[in-house]
Amino acid sequence: MTQVRLQLERSYQKQLQRFLAKWYASFGRVLRPYLSNLRQESLRIKKLPRAQRKDATNIVLSELDSLVTEIKKSQEFYDYQEYTYVWLVRFYELGAIDASASIGYPAISTRVNKALQRVYVAKEEKRRFELKDGLILFMLQDRAYFSSVLAAETMIRDAKKLIRDKFFKSDSAVEELATEMTTTFDNMSIKRARTIVRTESQVAIGNATHDMYKRSGIEYHTWLSVGDKQVRPAHKDNDGTTVRVGDPFQSGQIHTGDGPLATNCRCSTMPVIIDGLSFWGGGALLPVI
Ligand SMILES: [Zn+2]
């Protein structure tokens, strides 16, 4: 079951990563008009006493922040947000399915597992688990917006660093910088996209798992890290500890995918099974058109 979920998760992540990387790479071109004004500014700044240059440079760079507002109005931003939403819903569905299986609903998990295997093996599969809960769908839409803004802000931050290092510190020409920027953004886009997508899928899956535990009457859950050297210290401390569902683990997180420590996290939680479970009605196996 978990194996199928992980395979699906990875293939979902790849598709979202490709889309984000494309959007991110196109950003180098969006920056060109801004870069053309930089030459004049840089001549002015280079005449200033050394002590004043840093502040003047920061003022010029702060203009880049207004680009986030422009990006938010663009069609590309809207498309990315829509696309992210669709994938977040799928990640959430995967998390809910996985949690329902770990809680031990043999009838449901067997049905879902079979459907999942078929979805994974054959694209022509006609049925899949579909999330129907309006509140959760709304929450995921919000998250998609948040994730798009985050991606845009990360792009601006990377751009600032590039301009500061290459232009103001090492004196590159504007044309050179513009070209370099496009190439660099193409290369960085893959890495950035991977981090953003990994984090977002972890947030959706962590929320789904926690939601499923709450709705199913699970009282306690145990934190599980993957156990390698890359696990962050806070999650090493969490590893193997059990808390009441809804209470924070030692890291301060209520569940995996909660808060800033979700970045690049691969942890999960395991339910502690007690009698008296009831299955939620927030999703169903439905035909897909
Ligand atoms: Zn972790």
Image (cartoon, rainbow, N blue to C red):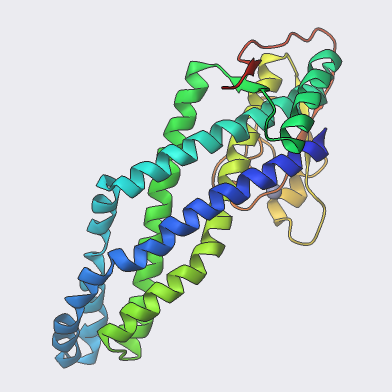
- Quarter occupied by residue 248: top right
In the visual, does 214 lie left or right of 15?
A: right
Task: State the image coordinates of residue 225 (x, y, percent, origin top left).
Answer: 78, 47
Task: State the image coordinates of residue 96 (x, y, percent, origin top left).
Answer: 68, 26
Q: Is residue 226 above or below residue 63?
A: above
Numbered label tally: 0
In the visual, does 201 lie left or right of 27?
A: right
**Nearest the eye: 174 or 11:** 11
Is residue 154 something one can see in this rendering? Answer: yes
**Nearest the eye: 177 or 142:** 177
**Nearest the eye: 32 or 232:** 32
- Quarter occupied by residue 215: top right
The residue at 49%/51% (across/down) is 19
Is residue 247 something one can see in this rendering? Answer: no
Q: Is residue 244 above or below residue 169?
A: above
Name the image quarter holding the C terminus: top right
The residue at 21%/65% (across/down) is 63
The residue at 34%/49% (across/down) is 76
Name the image quarter holding the N terminus: top right
Instruction: Point out the residue furthest to the front here.
Output: 124
Q: Is residue 211 above or below residue 267?
A: above
The residue at 38%/64% (across/down) is 157
Task: State the image coordinates of residue 133 (x, y, percent, origin top left).
Answer: 54, 16
**Nearest the eye: 231 or 14:** 14
Task: State the image coordinates of residue 144 (x, y, percent, origin top left).
Answer: 45, 38
